Image: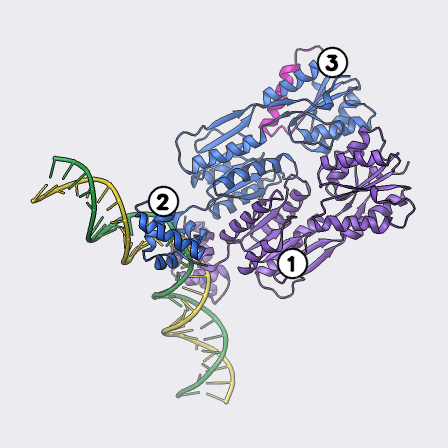
Chain colours: A blue, B purple, C yellow, D green
Amino acid sequence: MATIKDVSKLAGVSVATVSRYLNKNGYVSKEAGETIAEVIEKLNYRPNNIARSLAGMKTATIGLMVPDILNPFFPELARAIEDAANDYGYTVMLCNTDNDSAKEQKYIDTLLHKQVDGIIISSYGIKPEHLSSLQKQSIPVILIDNVFSSDSVVSLTVENERGGELAVEHLLERGCSKIAHICGPLSITSSRERTAGFENASRGTDWFTPSLIGYSDFTVHGGYTAMLELLSIHPDLDGIFASNDLMAAGALKALQESGKNVPRDVKVIGFDGIGLEMMTPELSTIAQPISELGKTAMDSLMGLIRKESDILTDQVFPVTLIAKQSTMTN
Amino acid sequence: MATIKDVSKLAGVSVATVSRYLNKNGYVSKEAGETIAEVIEKLNYRPNNIARSLAGMKTATIGLMVPDILNPFFPELARAIEDAANDYGYTVMLCNTDNDSAKEQKYIDTLLHKQVDGIIISSYGIKPEHLSSLQKQSIPVILIDNVFSSDSVVSLTVENERGGELAVEHLLERGCSKIAHICGPLSITSSRERTAGFENASRGTDWFTPSLIGYSDFTVHGGYTAMLELLSIHPDLDGIFASNDLMAAGALKALQESGKNVPRDVKVIGFDGIGLEMMTPELSTIAQPISELGKTAMDSLMGLIRKESDILTDQVFPVTLIAKQSTMTN
DNA sequence: TATATTTGTGTAAACGATAACATAACAGAG
DNA sequence: CTCTGTTATGTTATCGTTTACACAAATATA
């Protein structure tokens, strides 16, 4: 592989001039620039990123931490981030934390020593302590769906609470008169907010009672068992709002196996907006703007990396109702 | 951050001794080793990977190219690879190619210039030309589900053809008497093999006719439309083998919407073994050993990177039938 | 005309490691 | 007692960039 030295020699200039040409900083005469360009072309020269990183302390790499790559939400997010990263000439290092605090800590450590330029964290279990080592090295961090008030950390969230309300309003509109809720892990902020939305919209109605809330874990299986339990307590429920789509899918399965017809007997709505198009009936959902979240995450991260000053430290994205077959009337 | 120089100074030895200690090559006295260990502990020193890479030409990073991270098969594979990579102290760079040849080429270029130590390619559309630039730089490559005879390239595949046969045999065993097939893209080797398996097992039976094969594209929607088409030609079919699970899920959806009961009227089996547990009924499938594939891919890649000589250049993994509700009798 | 300022270029010191090479002490073999 | 091999350590070039600094020519300013 050709090096900058080869280029400089062949172009009859010093390496500094070539470097200045490459980085478009400092002065380079038009003439010199042209010869350099030609030589680069001829030698098919491409700067060595490693050397660049060592000299310049920039790696053009970011870390992405997700809790569970098997939940379709995260591949979708990862994809959006990856695409945006690519546009910036950045590559993404994927870290699957399994919601394991130890793994999280280890990955942060690894990313730190790989000298990534920034980190996007979409992992539920992250705690302020974990971030402190990042803060110390002043590595830019974007948190998705998780808030810590702190500078040099940007938080992106969605209107979780409003989404919960929307879901209930939609079910009511479609004629439901006894709506149950399957909530996610209480340790997760966004999960709690969705449940708060459910409570806002249903407390005060004549049918509401706390036992209409089932506690689960964001998995299909968890949604399935929670649904069975809810059914045994409230055989007459006719609407279900699950805090994510996977649990909604599990609930749907439980309902179908229990002989309930969805949407005729019971209507179901989820949250997230992952396209589980294989379901019959297809699931209504409160959709997050996943691609936009990913793109904004990357954009903001680049802002932090480049130390731009006009970065919004907290952004809240709207959610949208997507009505499908699972909440159809008649 | 502490550097090797800081350590050497504080330990009263030269950087070379510290380096030898770190890499466990060359001689280091017990005494010196202990002081160095202490100093490292005290300074919380960790070697700088970038500098290491520049000096030693190893980046401890591999690239992973997948065609479509939204197909659950690939997150599962990615996860297995990532776990194995971690055990080796390696990190994974994720590249989503979207089955786009141009993107593929660009990613290979990027990975090359990021100087990854090796690449695992699970992308369908890869062509020998693409690999040539890798060969030139003699970068180790592992191909999953794709074969190119060539040294320095290891191919991992599964018994696709046998799997196709297994699927048909299973359906026959469960009483099917007219089995249709939804095949995947003909451009994909493994897809063709699965279809060959179907043909092996069904040609010669009294019910077989070419129009029982529908052509599709490995997506849910593709499976759905292919199924509808097959149903219109053969309303009396009672078994379906789809070349992957996503198409099987789409087929299931189409069958249900057409008023067919699965498994009573029609039995369905897919291929891959991704756990689509949210389906009702759950899908039978010919499962690939995904985790094992991922782990072996990483192990073999490390073998190539370390220039070990005993690496199997082609490995074929067995598939296993997983019978679920969608092929139940009665 | 004298003096800044802008433009263009080169030299050489980082960046933080690895490893080739040199050196020396000490053991056992002859 | 010399020779050779093993153990242990240090010096320094190297990897391929970036960039601070020095310098000179050209241009603008006073």
- Disc 2 residue type (three-letter): Lys
- Label 1, residues with CA under 10 Å away: few <14, some 14-19, many ≥20: many
To which chain does the residue with label 2 belong?
A
**Residue at disc 1, secondary structure:** strand
In the picture of the structure, the residue carrying the numbered disc 1 is B154
Are the residues flagged by discs 3 and 1 in contact, CB closer than 8 Å? no
- Residue nearer the viewer, A210 or B71: B71
> Compared with residue A157, is residue A111 higher up or lower down, i.e. above or below?
below
- Residue nearer the viewer, B37 or B154: B154
In the picture of the structure, the residue carrying the numbered disc 2 is A24
In the picture of the structure, the residue carrying the numbered disc 3 is A177
Q: Quadrant of residue A186?
A: top right
- Residue nearer the viewer, B259 or A56: B259
- Circle 2 or circle 3, nearest the eye: 2
Residue A220 within the segment the image draws in magenta: no
- Disc 3 residue type (three-letter): Ser
> Compared with residue D13, is residue B293 higher up or lower down, i.e. above or below?
above
- Circle 3 or circle 1, nearest the eye: 1
* Mark 1 on the same chain as mark 2: no
- Counting from the top left corner in percent of width and height, residue B184 is at 73, 44
- What is the span of residues highlighted in magenta in the rendered image? A181-206
Are the residues flagged by discs 2 and 3 in contact, CB closer than 8 Å? no
> Compared with residue B308, is residue A247 higher up or lower down, i.e. above or below?
above
- Disc 1 residue type (three-letter): Val
Could you give the CA–CA distance between mark 1 and mark 2, rounded to whole angstroms? 42 Å
Task: Residue at 45%, 28% (x, y): give it.
Answer: A312
- Label 2, residues with CA under 10 Å away: few <14, some 14-19, many ≥20: few
